[in-house]
Image (cartoon, grey):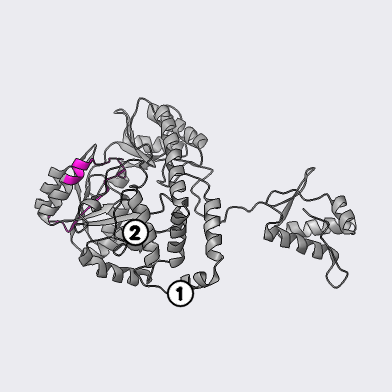
Amino acid sequence: MTIAEISLTKGETPLYRQLADVLAERIGSGELAPGERLPTHRALADAVGVTIGTVTRAYAEAERRGLVEARVGAGTYVRRPESPSWSFEQHDKNTRTLGYNIPPAIDRSEVLQRALQQLAGHGPTLNQLMLYQSPEGIGEHRHSLAGWLASLGVELDPEHLLFTSGAQHGVQLALQTLCRPGDNVLCERLTYPGLLSLARQQHLHARPVEMDEEGLLPEAVDAACRQHHPRLLYVTPTIQNPTTATMSDARRDALITVCREHGVLVLEDDVHGLLPRQHPAPLVNRDPEGVIHVGGLGKTLAPGLRLGYLQAPRVYREALVAGIQNHSWMISPLLTALAALLIEQGAADRLLQTVQSEMTARWERAAQCLSGYRLRFHPQGFHGWLELPDELPLSECLIQARARGLDVKSAELFTPPGYPAPPAIRIAASAPASVAELEQSLGLLREVLAGSGPRDAFTL
């Protein structure tokens, strides 16, 4: 802290309050950084020309305002900001979580700060972003996104794609626009719970289709189309949720062929599609007029962006634009501008690579911890699929996990109503706050799988 530049004047405002105001100003400007140690009471008093008592009262006033904190025997320090109380508590100190399918905890602060500072530094642009825009989104931002996706192997038309408030919103928008109550929607035998929830909400019938280790079986899709005459097929071809199945090029070609033969639209949920370092081209590349492609930036850049994208056959675009307008008029142009800046600055690539490296390291550790068990995962994916030992029923596994404060997701969550759930659980290696916490959670899971540890001695 530069104390020579502090000057106080005698007047109506007490000296200690003036000094506290100076501290507040310099902390707010960043001149005094979080965690920085302030001068001793005597040193600051001598430099400013006030009594030690004045400095003591000034530090006390600054502490009352939440600006500094006094540590017994160690001095006074600029207080570090706490996590906002309104933030989602994804790392509960009382629970070892392998449940949430969320991005790993990485530090995005520097790249976000740089992009936001650039946005804030040009007043006219910022003002323009605060005005109403077309539901179609700003063309420049669509071009930035389409260019970045093309570099990752996803071919979308910048004049045709639309922004959404996350991938989940894209799925909702597609179902709401293209389906009517009572329609049949084909889905994987084990599928994303968000799809099942939306189907219930919109009074649609989710019809499960059998899978193998690659995902949907084309012959099973063919049979289901003949039986149910579906409006569309919902599918996640890359890192399927929950099984992690990823379709080969041949399987994708076969699936598109079957759906074309039956005139069935494909709703491709590609929310995990950007995570693999190498992956087959998405279904939309094969048939842009037969596929509704939905993706998002939450898994790759930052979930707080709540920014996704959608491209559908051209005949449905006008109806989808109207759907966006009915939901929220537009997707926040400030968020699309931020995403475009992250792409243009190269930060999007760096964030994606950081996530890929983090997950590769986590799964290497998880594979070691769960050696000997039937675990399926993708090296850059967030979740894995664990088949339980034959002697461990699913219900008992969940009871024992809860007894240890361990959060895992039951196969029941991913099973359409009226169908049996397999003895398996989904675990998210991305959910723990660190690799060390991941190892602790996996250690508890091994106890559950081995059938050791706490059991209820008596129950009614």
Query: In the drawing, what numbered circle is on residue 131?
Result: 1
Tell me where the magenta segment starts and ends, as one range: 228-253
Q: Could you tell which of marks 1 and 2 lies nearer the N-terminus?
A: 1
Res. 387 mark: none
Q: Residue furthest top?
A: 372
Q: Is residue 190 left or right of residue 450?
A: left
Amino acid on which the number 2 mark rests in the picture:
Tyr
Q: Is 447 situated left or right of 162 in this image? A: right
x, y percentage for residue 281? Answer: 27, 46
Identify which residue is drawn at 77% across, 62% down.
22
| Residue of label 2 | 309
Contact flag, marks 1 and 2 (Cβ < 8 Å): no
Residue type (three-letter) at the residue carrying disc 1: Leu
Q: CA distance from mark 1 to mark 2?
A: 21 Å
Quadrant location of the C terminus in the rendered image: top left
Left or right: 79 in relation to 226: right
Q: Is residue 190 above or below residue 26?
A: above
**Residue 62: x %, y % from top left:** 75, 58
In terms of secondary structure, where does tag 2 sit? strand
Which of these two is toward me, 257 or 190? 257
Q: Residues within 10 Å of mark 2 (few under 14, many from 20)?
A: many
